[in-house]
Amino acid sequence: MPKNCSSQSLEDDVLKLARSVAESGKPIGLPFNAVSADISSPQPMCDTAGRPFAETIFRWIDPNFEYWKDRMFALRSTLVHATRTCAEPFYYSKGKVMSWRRNEALVAATNPEQYAAANIGAAIISPVHLPGGAIGAVVWASDKEIDLADAFAANAANLHALALRFVATYHDARDLGPQGPAVYLTRREIQCLKWAAAGKTDAEIATIMHISVPTVRFHITNSATKLGVTGKARAIQRASTLGYIGHE
């Protein structure tokens, strides 16, 4: 239960935002919702009493399909998989998945037959990519086939902002996000990690950067300590998640 006024305020905000999510899809014909604070976790989004919002505030197309109790659902669902490939809102309509722009990865990650099998006639999905690598998602859906092109153009930005506020506030209320101050890596630490991510050995990195091998190892070890992980591979993965190592 909340321990102070601040945490109580967060819990109140979570409930208000959950109700807003439930109501916001109805005017555009999408009365059903599915939500996840972290698609990598089998834990459903719950109130402070431990009751899943999917059982109290939200309802789904098939009332007997309790997806939040299925620990393997995220691995099977084409809808969930699509949120891993796209950070912007997208929609399913007329057997196709689309967004504000052509996204080949999103199209490739989608199996329309799964939408049909789940009796989803139309849906707007908002992935929520948070600091630390967590991915949440909010879905507004209908069991009827609806042409969502105009509704998506008019409402996607607001729905996406609402989804972000809801999931991020939930993470804050449950202390699920990164704790403490931001991690700062030095230029040398980032350079060493970037070359390591490119497959270079410590000796090769030393030659490229005109420093000694022990210095390379010092920078990589120091960056791992700052990132709160152990080992070069974990440091690379964590630095990539935080945006220190981009795709060249």
Image (tube, grey):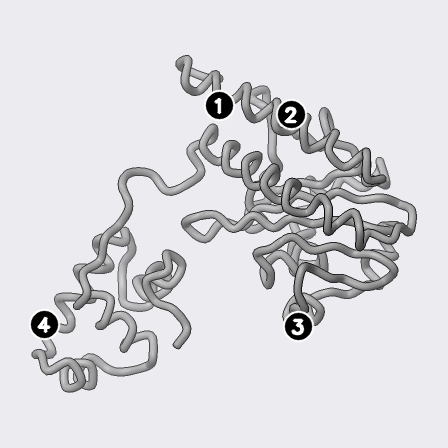
Question: Which mark is nearer the camera, 1 or 4?
Answer: 1
How far apart are labels 1 and 4 at the CA level? 45 Å
The answer to whether residue 213 is above or below residue 115 is: below
Whether label 1 touches label 4, CB < 8 Å:
no
The residue labelled by disc 3 is 104
Whether label 3 touches label 1, CB < 8 Å:
no
Residue 13 in the image: x percent, y percent?
Answer: 54, 23
Residue occupying the point 71% across, 68% down: 107
Question: Which mark is nearer the camera, 3 or 2?
Answer: 3
Q: Earlier in the sequence, mark 2 or mark 1?
A: 1
Residue type at tag 1: Leu
Residue 129 in the image: x percent, y percent?
Answer: 52, 51
Question: Which mark is nearer the camera, 2 or 1?
Answer: 1
How far apart are labels 4 and 2 at the CA level? 52 Å
Residue occupying the point 73% across, 46% down: 154
How far apart are labels 3 and 4 at the CA level? 42 Å
Q: Earlier in the sequence, mark 3 or mark 2?
A: 2
The residue labelled by disc 2 is 51
How far apart are labels 2 and 1 at the CA level? 17 Å
Please rate how many residues cluster around mark 4, counting C-alpha atoms within 10 Å: few if below 14, some from 14 to 19, many from 20.
some
The residue labelled by disc 4 is 215
SS of the residue under disc 1: helix
SS of the residue under disc 3: helix
Q: Which mark is residue 10?
A: 1
Which residue is at the far right? Answer: 144
Please rate how many residues cluster around mark 3, counting C-alpha atoms within 10 Å: few if below 14, some from 14 to 19, many from 20.
few
Please rate how many residues cluster around mark 2, counting C-alpha atoms within 10 Å: few if below 14, some from 14 to 19, many from 20.
few
Please rate how many residues cluster around mark 1, counting C-alpha atoms within 10 Å: few if below 14, some from 14 to 19, many from 20.
some
How far apart are labels 3 and 1 at the CA level? 38 Å
